[in-house]
Amino acid sequence: MSAVSFTGRVAVVTGAGGGLGRAHALELASRGAKVVINDLGGDISGENGGTAMADQVVEEIRAAGGEAVSNYDSVATPEGGRSIVQTALDAFGKIDILINNAGNIRNAAFTDLTPTAIDALLAVHVNGAFYVTQPAFTNMRENGYGRIVFTSSAAGLFGSIQQANYAAAKGGVFGLANVVALEGAPHGILANTILPAALSRMGADMNEDQFVGMPTTPAHAEPEMISALVAYLASDANTRSHELYSIARGRYARVFMGVTPGWHVAADEPVATPDDVAAHIDQIRDLDGYSIPGSMNEEFALVR
Ligand code: NAD
């Protein structure tokens, strides 16, 4: 039997009407999960919704012998988030797995980003992850079991030109995921984050300036490559939480936030001056012996 099985499990995949979300939903359903296919069916900016995208994926799953239901609400409101999770409770009685995948994009140079372009991205990526995860977490906590996968982006953690709104939103998703992982730990809820790179309509929104320095040799870019990691993280085969993984061009890798040993001013020494910082900047930046704190408290505990 496969190590990655979802028999008896109920999953919600947001933004599952196309792209990566569709591939995640098909993978989970093919391994036995009952799945809520959420998608508002809009264009790449998140406008002009409809029911067709979600329904089509539900049909695909049913045609293959699986179980799925549609939900057309936006993740970006508290009512939408509640409705999405309620769809799982009404249809299947619980929620075990949440894949926060819904996303929109509106690229522009930093100073050209309008308030609307900033707010629209924060609304879907950050608020959306909050509003769906809160009711899902409540049900998972009651059941003592949960697997949550958040979708961030290399753009958010490493930076990407003309995507300041997207990067800020994806950075927010990462911050949220870290706290959900910590608060979920006592309740059997594991939360991890992915940084995917795959061919979808989102990549088509990039322009030539944004591709400078990127390799052009052939490489895997199928959504299914991302779904393999998502399914693993959502399964009982995964026992880790609070982690971050990148999948790009066929390479699966762990990404982490580390802190250097740094330079330490002891409590009985005078307060540092800017000149002291300048004198020690190489030691502050030296990566040798870095640590990966599992929380804010663990970071502070490194410095006694
Ligand atoms: P996509 O545009 O094909 O899929 C996003 C889906 O989310 C769409 O079906 C859309 O209708 C839906 N959606 C948008 N706003 C919504 C809302 N308010 N409520 C519910 N659904 C909504 O793009 P994709 O490439 O499949 O992206 C999936 C996720 O992966 C996104 O979060 C994206 O930011 C992230 N991502 C993708 C890549 C990539 O290389 N494709 C890279 C990094 C991160």
Image (tube, rainbow, N blue to C red):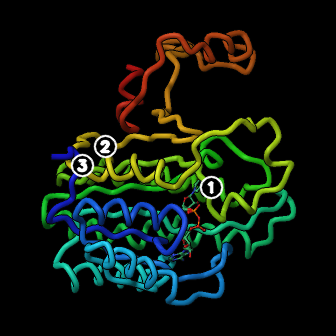
> Which marked residue is nearer to the observer: mark 2 or mark 3?
3
Q: Is residue 87 above or below residue 224?
A: below
Q: Is residue 213 above or below residue 41?
A: above
In the image, residue 30 lies at what x, y percent?
29, 63
Give the labeled residue for mark 1.
199
| Image quarter (top left, top right, bottom left or bottom right) of the C terminus | top left
Which corner quadrant of the image does residue 279 belong to?
top right
Residue 4 — which label?
A: 3
Residue type at mark 3 is Val
In the image, residue 295 lies at what x, y percent?
37, 38
Residue at point 18%, 52% (across, down): 188
Residue type at mark 1 is Leu
Query: Is residue 67 found left or right of 202 in the rendered image?
Result: left
- How far apart are labels 2 and 3 at the CA level? 17 Å
Residues at marks 2 and 3 touching, judged by CB atoms closer than 8 Å: no
Circle 3 packing at 10 Å, graded few (<14), some (14-19), many (20+), is some
Residues at marks 1 and 2 touching, judged by CB atoms closer than 8 Å: no
The secondary element bearing badge 3 is classed as: loop
In the image, residue 24 lies at what x, y percent?
41, 61
Residue 241 — which label?
A: 2
Residue at point 23%, 58% (across, down): 146
Mark 1 sits near ligand 1, with its Cβ under 8 Å away: yes
